[in-house]
Image (cartoon, rainbow, N blue to C red):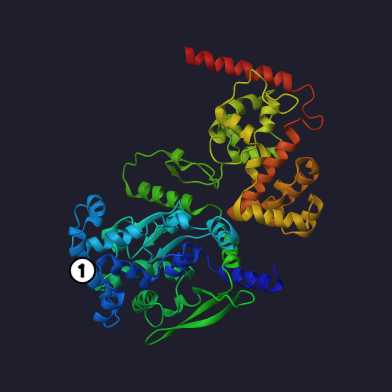
Amino acid sequence: MTEATDAFENELLAHLNQFTSAPFLFVGSGFSLRYAESDNWTQLLERMAGLAGKPYAYYSSSANGDPLQTATLIAEDLREHWWSAPEFAESREAFPHPSGRESPFKYEVAKSLEGIASRLPDVGPLNDELEALRVATVEGIITTNFDEILEYVFPDFVPYVGQDELLFKDPKGVAEIYKIHGSAAQPESLVITSSDFERFRPRNPYLAAKLLTIFVEHPVIFVGYSLSDPNVRSIITSIASVLTNDNIHQLENRLIFLNWDPDASAPTVAPSTFALDDTSIPIRLITAPDFLSTFHVLGQLHRRFPAKILRHLKHEVYELARTSEPSKTVVVSDLESDTNLDQVDVVIGVGVSKRLQDKGVTGLTRRDLILDVLDPKIELRNYPQIVTDVLPSLAHQRTHTPIHQWLRGAGLLDENGDLVSDADVAPGIRARLRLSIQMLRPNGYFGKRAHRLLEEHPDFDSLVANLPPGDALLAIPFLTPDSVDPSKLRSYLLEHQRLYSEGTVDASTKWIKCVFLYDYLMNKRAVGDRWTAKSNSSRGRQKEKSSGRGSRRRG
């Protein structure tokens, strides 16, 4: 990272940290063009004009260059051709009941966007940007794009299609994609012709009122739009019209435009203005040769829980408050960044004290097990029950739960760290043992970044001495296990334990992975004298408990 890039990231991070809420993204067609080489508006209409049987220039000149009217003329001609031409037989079979004259045109537009996510890069700088974006701290997304690329990049986000769904389906404002001009997944929803926009515009004030909360409570980062884009100008004008002159300052510096300039030597962020008819709004303008640094900053923003869990929590607590006799199960529990939401109905508390004393072994959570690996307090006699009653519910999730300490203490690992032949453990635990530390090493952008860091800092001491904790923790699992001193790793993890409770989701996950590595190094092959003369008695208790559990099942 150059000095200029480092200064940019620090400045942008400081700007975003002044807001109490995570950013929204406002995504335009330039995003899809950048990452999937999709058609721009003119190219899309040229493609549709070809299907209608006349040159695009014919329709554009007939519409006096108005793109919306051009789309309307193409839709009218395509309708006649679509119902009779044999090349559209498959389309007619798939879409047998169009609701309007322009519906065949919309169906063909949607069809042209099928499989667009398969065009996304899987290597190279653009893939690195997408990998960084996938782990960015983003509250939600607004887009005028038709395609489903954003659903692919943010698979946990819930899409709301069109104005009606946004206005009447009670979105929660977290982990959602607002597709205000429709979606290719619902062809009839597309807003693309002049008649579509005639229906859309009168309801713009209602949409603006719905989006107003987002704009005054969150920073909004525009990606894939220019400052002159008519869609952006229309929506911001509508939002500004809802605010009085005294309140327009609430938008000040919340709007951030990301502008690509391949000739820029380094990314910069500078004050600018967004000029409306009768006022101007102070904004921030990012000019960058690529988007990697911007997306990397978004990944550093603090949020204790990822957006999908916050959305689930907000929905369920709202339902609990709204319903006089709630039927759901109310759970007070810790929330981890990878909690399995299928196992939770309602969560109304965070943090459970004195868990072991109050609830016993079965009340232990993943957090309890992680912290105990670094500072053992759970009595060895409880390890067999942890293996049989606690680990199975954690190991089957896509989490990095340490398992070796509990298996070793229960006497279920041999001297090589493999399960003993008669071990009775859940399939998920066996799977985790097979994956071992390989699952700590991500592919894509983060894997390549870890290898680049190791080229400059090839050992543990160099990593922790020269890199910030986030980078060091990313690279440490890629070291060969024999080169890592467990005691040094433990000291480093304890020194930076605040990353688990106070850091970003990304930083917390890296820290947890290194705890898993420490557990592997210390307990897979019983390093030190901790396990001397202990495992056999523990194993006996585990076998006794397993036998008793089996007898109860048979009974």
Quarter-of-image position of residue 117: bottom left
Locate the N terminus and report the quarter of the image it occupies: bottom right
Residue shown at the point (28%, 75%) measured from the top left: 68
Q: How many marks?
A: 1
Image position of 158 (left or right of 102): right
For residue 375, say whether it is visible: no
- Where is mark 1, residue-wise? 77
Image position of 497 (left or right of 18): right
In the image, residue 520 lies at what x, y percent?
71, 37
In the image, residue 381 lies at what x, y percent?
68, 24
Whether 328 is drawn above or below 219: the answer is above
Residue lying furthest bottom in this view? 278
Whether 233 is drawn above or below 336: the answer is below
Q: For numbered disc 1, what is the local secondary structure?
A: helix
Q: Nearer the viewer, residue 222 or 48?
A: 48
Quarter-of-image position of residue 227: bottom left
Mark 1 Cα within 10 Å, few/some/many (few <14, many 20+)? some
Residue shown at the point (68%, 38%) measured from the top left: 372
In the image, residue 184 lies at what x, y percent?
33, 58
Q: Nearer the viewer, residue 204 or 360?
A: 204
Image position of 11 (left or right of 118): right
Amino acid of disc 1: Asp
Q: Nearer the viewer, residue 315 or 177?
A: 177
For residue 22, say whether it is visible: yes
Quarter-of-image position of residue 7: bottom right
